[in-house]
Amino acid sequence: MSIEVNNESALPANEEELTRLARFIMDKLYLHPQSELSVILVDEEAMERLHIEWMDEPGPTDVMSFPMDELRPGTASRPAAAGMLGDIVICPQVAAAQAKAAGHTMEEEILLLETHGLLHLLGYDHAEPEEKEEMFGLQRELLSGFLGRDAPLETMQ
């Protein structure tokens, strides 16, 4: 798997842990070993520009996902096809504020946001109550499995 993590923000981030989490999730969801993913951490100004350009909404947001090949999870007997998952863009400054409000660390929040973004790349959504239950349940299961303990609850805006 090709997982590229770039921190373009002013805040430090554990790029190695972000890579390990992405690999863990991609393995658990039976993605092809040649799948590609990019994770980019940006400052508030860059995130706000993306948020306005792609969602027509002002202000920075916590995470945005940009799917490429519209890959979907596979199964043990039928792994997903190889391809480019796309880009996950995370704003650590927004994550820090959300983490403080939720009572957990910024690092935990960034891992939560990466998990959330990766699920969006795989076609999961939370617009409808049933979709939200499925997506957030899987998000919690995956992150808890990676951390080896209960994961922080969703705090996305």
Image: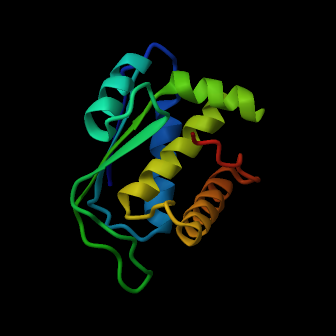
Say above or below: 24 vs 152: below
Horizontal arrangement in the rendering, residue 57 relative to residue 143 (left or right): left
Rendered location of residue 95, percent (x, y): 57, 30
Say above or below: 54 vs 129: above
Say above or below: 40 vs 127: above
Rendered location of residue 134, percent (x, y): 58, 69
- Residue at 76% across / 53% down in the picture? 150
Rendered location of residue 22, percent (x, y): 46, 50
- Residue at 44% across / 64% down in the picture? 124
Residue 22 vs residue 141, the one in the foreground: 141
- Residue at 46% across / 28% down in the picture? 91
Q: How many marks?
A: 0
Where's the N terminus, which quadrant? bottom left
Horizontal arrangement in the rendering, residue 150 relative to residue 116 (left or right): right
Which residue extends farthest top? 10
Rendered location of residue 9, percent (x, y): 42, 18
Colouring chosen for the image of the structure = rainbow
Which residue extends farthest bottom? 77
Q: Quadrant of residue 41?
A: top left
Where's the C terminus, which quadrant? top right
- Residue at 64% across / 31% down in the picture? 98
Residue 31 vs residue 94, the one in the foreground: 94
